[in-house]
Amino acid sequence: GAGVSQSPSNKVTEKGKDVELRCDPISGHTALYWYRQRLGQGLEFLIYFQGNSAPDKSGLPSDRFSAERTGESVSTLTIQRTQQEDSAVYLCASSLALGVAGRKLFFGSGTQLSVL
Amino acid sequence: GENVEQHPSTLSVQEGDSAVIKCTYSDSASNYFPWYKQELGKGPQLIIDIRSNVGEKKDQRIAVTLNKTAKHFSLHITETQPEDSAVYFCAAGGGFKTIFGAGTRLFVKA
């Protein structure tokens, strides 16, 4: 596609339920990132993929959070047993990951997660 | 790890005036400093970036400066227009990890 696509755009769930967020990166982009943005705040790094491996998982807030990526395409971020503090916009970005030009991140519009 | 501080958190200027946003970073290994603009309901979009071997870069009304010794970098927007109103994020990166500041909400009053 022309840009990074995220689905769903909005998700409302009940506390304790599991949710799965999806990201389709730009074709050919080998690097993929997940960030969390709480209301009125900055972008909090969650996890980074190079291909389908995740060399840096340091930002995942707890073991309720996990992510996977199939090849160099779709990634899913799963949050188990959701809590109200998980409410935020979850942003996905992709990049070429080749030299300096690869540092430019292309973001999707995000998934707004609301945990009631 | 890297920590990026950004200020001010909110900035209001009159149309036509200049706006300056400042950031500091902690990791001397960071060598890439992008700036992103986020409009309501959208993901951030890169507007300009600078590498550590350059002190200043300009693109039309936008300029960035970098002081590696002091670990400071700044965004300057001249002749501001209402459409410049948005949230602006600075970031610092080394390798493939990019750490963002908390953001500056810019209001340009017509």
Image (cartoon, coloured by chain):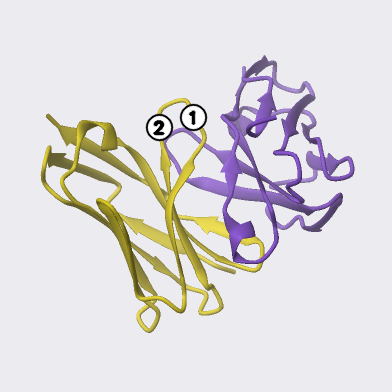
A40 left or right of B78 in image? right
Label 2: how many Cα within 10 Å (few below 14, some 14–19, many 20+)? some
Tell me the colour chain A is drawn in: purple
Where residue B40 appears, x then y in whole percent? 41, 27
Q: Secondary structure at mark 1?
A: loop
**The C terminus of chain B lies in quadrant:** top left
Against A13, residue B41 (above or below) is below
Quick one: A19 or A110, which is closer to the camera? Answer: A110
Q: Which residue is mark 1?
A: B42
B50 left or right of A35 in image? left
Amino acid type of the residue tagged 2 in the rendering: Glu
**The N terminus of chain B lies in quadrant:** bottom right
- Decide: marks 2, 1 in contact (CB < 8 A)? yes
Chain letter, colour yellow: B
Label tally: 2
Q: Which residue is mark 2?
A: B39
Amino acid type of the residue tagged 1 in the rendering: Lys
